[in-house]
Amino acid sequence: DSGVTQTPKHLITATGQRVTLRCSPRSGDLSVYWYQQSLDQGLQFLIQYYNGEERAKGNILERFSAQQFPDLHSELNLSSLELGDSALYFCASTSWGGPTGELFFGEGSRLTVL
Amino acid sequence: QQQVKQSPQSLIVQKGGISIINCAYENTAFDYFPWYQQFPGKGPALLIAIRPDVSEKKEGRFTISFNKSAKQFSLHIMDSQPGDSATYFCAAQTSYDKVIFGPGTSLSVIP
């Protein structure tokens, strides 16, 4: 158990809809990362937050947005969903300031858009 | 400049053999190079990592070799076991910054 919690684990929705994925980082971790993993694809970096502030942006679509709240949990909002958005969405957290820089991943939220 | 290349895309190794996965990066600002292991239906988990001030790091059957001048690093899995069958991702990162992953290598270890 990595200590990172993602909800929901599975989500099925229709094109055009909007969903919110939630991530609770490990206790004490200030930094949260979101990654998208499509079928047989690698981990595409979406966005990073550090202590509530956006730190870095990757290939995140304009239809997607995220935020990190004062209690450090994060939400990834996906809107106007398309079939191609079907993927596993991973959240990872790290403390930074630690010796290793290790990312601790949740088990992912599997989104299916029909 | 932010890309991390990884090869091969897939690898089949006999039990007891050596699995070798190679990665290359371009950004010289990267200062931490981890390898993550991912089993189906699970999130990736850190396997082993290295900083560029050393050329090799070994943990059990897993070894990272690092060539700073060539901007390349590789994962060697000695005495590969069926339980090692998973997807392996190399990554490169700078402290407090985004982590760039390679595209992954699907390893199958056959008995």
Image (spheres, coloured by chain):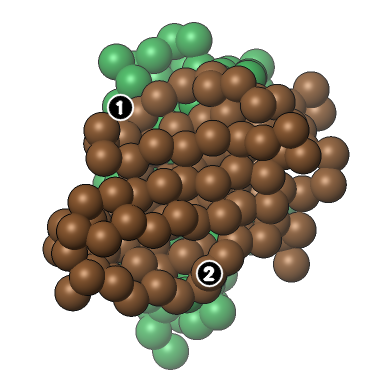
Chain colours: A brown, B green
Residue drawn where x is 32% and y is 56% of the image: A18
Closer-to-camera residue (B62/B88): B88
Residue drawn where x is 47% and y is 21% of the image: A56
Residue A55 spot, x, y in % from top left: 54, 20
User: Mark 1: which secondary structure?
Assistant: loop
Q: Badge 2, how many Cα within 10 Å: few under 14, some, many 20+? A: some
Asked where in the image residue A84 lies, by quadrant, the reply is: bottom left
Against A62, residue B51 (above or below) is: above
Residue drawn where x is 61% and y is 53% of the image: A23
Residue B77 showing in the rendered view: no
Residue A63 spot, x, y in % from top left: 26, 40
Q: Is residue A74 left or right of residue B41?
A: right
Closer-to-camera residue (B52/B87): B87
Against A30, residue A18 (above or below) is: below
User: Mark 2: which secondary structure?
Assistant: loop
Residue B15 spot, x, y in % from top left: 46, 80
Q: Is residue B38 left or right of residue B2?
A: right
* Amino acid bearing label 2: Pro
Q: Nearer the viewer, mark 1 or mark 2?
A: 2
The residue that disc 2 covers is A8
**Subunit that carries the residue with mark 1:** B
Asked where in the image residue A87 lies, by quadrant, the reply is: bottom left
The residue that disc 1 covers is B3
Q: Badge 1, how many Cα within 10 Å: few under 14, some, many 20+? A: some
Q: Quadrant of the C terminus of chain B?
A: bottom left
Mark pair 1, 2: CA separation: 31 Å
**Subunit that carries the residue with mark 2:** A
Q: Is residue B67 left or right of residue A99?
A: left
Q: Which mark is residue A42?
A: none
Closer-to-camera residue (B102/A89): A89
